[in-house]
């Protein structure tokens, strides 16, 4: 019944296109300086005779607006947008049934914004809308030569830990969009393949509306990439090279750092074409210190196996992207894109273990063994995909958009554990290998329709998405051992995911109040087939996802926002795969084919204040999470821990985030963002059939700061710091993590060329930067590992721009395969 109800609502929205209309006025609101469209600008039409308000509308993502059902007469138009001077169009004379196009209505930036532009030569660094905050990527100089993660980690709601894990308001699950297109992949993987130099803006959508996929408990991050000049040819090129860090961890080889990217854009008449390619080699040196013990209450033995040694990464990726947009007329737009790329990672962990077995009661030493474990884990992924989009605009300014995407990815790798004697490391005690192949194919189809009704806009749509994965996993031990469950370590795991969804939402403005409210219905089916299990593991879900966002404009400086949305954190295939992998000598890792997705209720509210030299926002938020997905430990054997995925009963987060963008002086700008929240997880945990209870909570805070100094017309200095405090987990705590950076920039050739010297991970021998300790414990085990990464790294980035780019480029990105890398 729910599905039929939403199908009816969807087609009710579509049927509005057939309704008869009176006179109408259409147009588009743009920035007078650069011609960029202004979304969510307020447009109102008044009678000329008495200046009474007749109708109003809010512009869409392309700045377009439509005012319909107007009677014949004389009118004038007023356009308002935060940070811009009001725009007026007078002398509008309408006749019965006339559809008058005003073309582009240009707005000049207000004095506060103009002052900032005059000083920096760039657009505002931060802007706030009813459903999102937008951050200009170019303000973060330390990200130059890096990837999109290096930009993203500076946002006030975002933090990154020592493992590279990204969280939004403390949640590791969030949906990534590339130019509005969903990327149902692991965020760290997909963003690491996108050069920072290609990113124009980042939109943070913490309370998404119903038109977006409900994936991700942390909300949505939309990456807007750069595009060519308004008309003509634009070329952007960057090269990066770096030195090994000044700290020595005794690694076998020095890390290599170099890369480059090139983007060529051409726009002329009806065509807009973008081609880009990049190669990045960015190794990481490091070290780890671990301490573990397990208790065997049956035999009365406690086994300790502290360890230390190298933990380094060799990493590279390369990719090519191409897109083309063809606009034969003002009513039709065709666009297509293609992507092909490769990513490789080799993690080397050469660890020395000192194992002892002692009497659990007396502490008397029973046995002692020292051995060396050389652990090499390789992962490779070859990705290719294509997308095709079509948009049709009708006479009543309604739009119909159809989108299709297909991806094929070939993922494969191996984990090899070699236990060697010590100090005689020529003697091989045991070798364990876990090779695998994991191909994945997926596709998505979307159909969206929007039409202006009354003083607002009704949007409705349907989406179908499907992905399948056929993983083959093997297990070899030499010399062979007597392991009763060895067959469980090899086999195949086939996963199928299919989601049908429909949505409808209405947005508009009533005097000072802007609003967006909608509802989404989804039917999702998941099947996991295992080679050793005759019965497939199935899960069917039917759910509603409501959302509402409000923004009230108190005056020209003050506004306040509030929002609510229901979200889902889906399981990925890695979390569902129960075939164990010997990730380390001391660790097995496996998933659960019956793992449940998490359901999240998000609510937030807070004010935004704009003043002459900047802006500030404060947002209070609350999250309630049902079935939070956790990675926890249990004891597999005396010297091996089993790391598994499971569901806890519930978790909740409440917190406060704030950010400000200031310009205290013409030569000094400051960006500061902070987040503090209280996280609690509680309830029962089922770990491989064994039940336990968890109840852990604590306060967590993070701070991201970025400050820039203009040292002249061509020189600038920037410093930034990212800090994340200690935070609770289901079985323990992750320690704090600190990363400070500094960059010095010099521009040449009227700004078309720039050289940036970066000092990353500043530490100066204080041993405070790039370190993180992860601790977990249970009734019969305790483990703590301190990960130490390289510090004081120097990079040089050179960039060149011919016709400085700006705006959106619809270059595609991996949608499915990256998630399983």
Image (cartoon, rainbow, N blue to C red):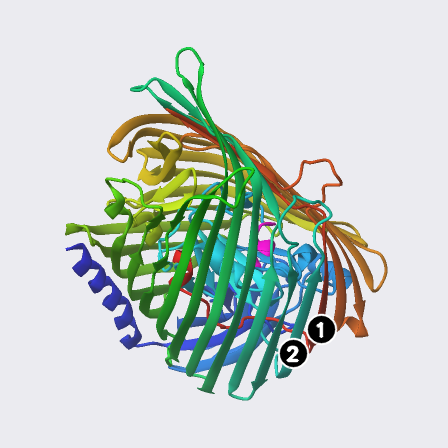
Please state the extent of the stretch shown in magenta in the rendering: 148-154
The answer to which image quadrant residue 395 occupies is: bottom left
- Please state if 29 lies on the left or on the right of 526 as rendered: right
- Please state if 558 lies on the left or on the right of 480 as rendered: right
- Check the image and report above or below for 596 versus 79: above
Q: Is residue 48 visible?
A: no
- Where residue 466 appears, as percent x and y from the top left, is 28, 64
**Residue at the spot 81% in from the left edge and 54% down from the top edge:** 667
- Seen from the viewer's position, the closer of residues 325 and 163 is 163
Q: Is residue 794 visible?
A: yes
Residue 800 image label: 1
Residue 647 image label: none
- Check the image and report above or below for 234 versus 368: below
- Please state if 354 lies on the left or on the right of 642 as rendered: right
- Where residue 221 appears, as percent x and y from the top left, is 48, 55
Please name the predominant secondary structure of the magenta segment in the image. Answer: helix
* Quadrant (top left/top right/bottom left/bottom right) for the N terminus: bottom left
**Which residue is disc 2 drawn over?**
235
Mark 2 element type: strand
Mark 1 element type: strand
- Where residue 796 appears, as percent x and y from the top left, is 73, 61
CA neighbours of label 2 inside 10 A, class few (<14), some (14 to 19), many (20+):
many
- Seen from the viewer's position, the closer of residues 501 and 498 is 498
**Residue at the spot 20% in from the left edge and 54% down from the top edge:** 531
* Quadrant (top left/top right/bottom left/bottom right) for the C terminus: bottom left
Q: Are marks 1 and 2 in contact (CB under 8 Å)?
A: yes
- Check the image and report above or below for 583 versus 471: above
- Please state if 464 lies on the left or on the right of 257 as rendered: left
**Residue at the spot 39% in from the left edge and 50% down from the top edge:** 216
- Seen from the viewer's position, the closer of residues 708 and 360 is 360
- Where residue 77 appears, as percent x and y from the top left, is 54, 70
């Amino acid at each position: 019944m729910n599905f039929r109800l939403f199908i009816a609502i969807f087609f009710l929205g579509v049927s509005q296109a057939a309704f008869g209309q009176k006179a109408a006025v259409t147009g588009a609101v743009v920035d007078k300086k650069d011609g960029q469209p202004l979304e969510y600008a307020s447009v109102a039409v008044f009678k000329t005779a008495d200046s009474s308000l007749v109708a109003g509308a809010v512009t869409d993502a392309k700045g377009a607006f439509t005012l319909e059902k107007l009677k014949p007469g004389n009118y004038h138009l007023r356009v308002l947008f935060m940070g811009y001077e009001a725009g007026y169009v007078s002398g509008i004379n309408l006749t019965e049934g006339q559809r008058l196009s005003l073309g582009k209505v240009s707005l000049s930036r207000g004095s506060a914004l103009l002052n900032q532009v005059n000083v920096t030569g760039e657009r505002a660094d931060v802007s706030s809308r009813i459903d999102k905050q937008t951050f200009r990527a170019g303000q973060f100089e330390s990200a130059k030569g890096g990837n999109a993660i290096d930009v993203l980690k500076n946002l006030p709601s975002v933090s990154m830990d020592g493992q590279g894990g990204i969280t939004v308001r403390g949640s590791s699950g969030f949906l990534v969009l590339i130019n509005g297109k969903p990327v149902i992949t692991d965020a760290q993987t997909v963003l690491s393949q996108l050069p920072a130099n290609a990113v124009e803006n980042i939109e943070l959508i913490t309370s998404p509306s119903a038109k977006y996929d409900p994936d991700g408990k942390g909300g949505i991050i939309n990456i807007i990439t750069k595009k060519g000049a308004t008309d003509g040819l634009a070329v952007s090129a960057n090269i990066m090279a770096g030195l090994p860090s000044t700290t020595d961890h005794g690694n076998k080889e020095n890390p290599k750092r170099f890369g480059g990217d090139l983007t060529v854009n051409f726009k002329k008449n009806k065509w807009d074409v973008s081609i880009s390619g990049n190669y990045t080699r960015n190794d990481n040196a490091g070290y780890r210190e671990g301490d573990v013990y397990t208790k065997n209450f049956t035999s009365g033995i406690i086994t300790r196996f502290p360890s230390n040694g190298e933990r380094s990464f060799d990493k590279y990726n390369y990719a090519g992207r191409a897109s083309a947009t063809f606009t034969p007329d003002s009513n039709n737009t065709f666009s297509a894109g293609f992507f092909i790329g490769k990513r490789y990672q080799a993690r080397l962990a050469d660890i020395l273990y000192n194992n002892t077995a002692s009497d659990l009661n007396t502490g008397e030493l029973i046995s002692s063994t020292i051995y060396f474990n050389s652990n090499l884990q390789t992962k490779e992924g070859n990705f290719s995909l294509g997308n095709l989009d079509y948009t049709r605009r009708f006479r009543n300014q309604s739009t119909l958009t159809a989108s299709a995407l297909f991806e094929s990815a070939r993922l494969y790798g191996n984990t090899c554990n070699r236990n060697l004697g010590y100090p005689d490391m020529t003697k091989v005690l045991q070798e364990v290998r876990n090779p695998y192949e994991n191909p994945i194919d997926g596709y998505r189809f979307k159909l969206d329709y929007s039409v202006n009704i009354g003083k607002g806009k009704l949007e409705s749509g349907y989406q179908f998405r499907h992905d399948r994965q056929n993983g083959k996993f093997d297990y070899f031990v030499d010399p062979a051992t007597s392991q009763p469950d060895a067959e469980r370590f090899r086999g195949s795991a086939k996963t199928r995911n299919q989601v049908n969804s429909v949505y409808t939402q209405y947005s508009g403005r009533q005097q000072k109040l802007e609003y967006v409210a909608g509802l989404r219905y989804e039917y999702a089916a998941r099947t996991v087939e295992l080679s050793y299990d005759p019965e497939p593991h199935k899960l069917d879900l039917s759910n509603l996802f409501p959302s509402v966002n409000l923004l009230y404009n108190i005056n020209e400086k003050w506004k306040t926002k509030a929002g609510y949305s229901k979200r889902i954190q889906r399981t990925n295939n890695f979390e569902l795969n129960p075939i164990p992998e010997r990730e380390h000598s001391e660790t097995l890792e496996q998933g659960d084919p019956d793992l449940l997705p998490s359901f999240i209720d998000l609510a937030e509210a807070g004010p935004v204040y704009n003043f002459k030299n900047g802006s500030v926002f404060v947002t209070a938020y609350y999250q309630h999470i049902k079935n939070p997905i956790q990675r926890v430990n249990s004891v597999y054997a005396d010297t091996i821990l089993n790391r598994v995925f499971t569901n806890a009963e519930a978790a909740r987060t409440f917190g406060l985030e704030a950010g400000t963008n200031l310009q205290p002086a013409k030569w000094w700008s400051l960006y500061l963002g902070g987040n503090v929240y209280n996280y609690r997880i509680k309830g029962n945990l089922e770990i491989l059939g064994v039940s336990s209870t968890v109840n852990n909570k604590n306060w967590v805070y993070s701070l991201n700061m970025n400050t820039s100094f203009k040292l002249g017309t061509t020189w600038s200095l920037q410093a930034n710091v990212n800090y994340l405090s200690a935070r609770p987990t289901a079985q323990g705590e992750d320690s704090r993590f600190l990363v400070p950076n500094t960059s010095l920039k010099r521009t040449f050739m009227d700004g078309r060329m720039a050289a940036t010297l970066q000092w990353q991970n500043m530490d100066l021998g204080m041993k405070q930067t790039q370190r993180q300790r992860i601790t977990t414990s249970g009734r019969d085990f305790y483990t703590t590992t301190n990960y130490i990464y390289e510090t004081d790294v120097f990079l040089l980035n050179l960039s060149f721009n011919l016709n400085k780019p700006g705006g959106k480029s619809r270059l595609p990105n991996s949608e499915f395969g990256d998630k399983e890398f």
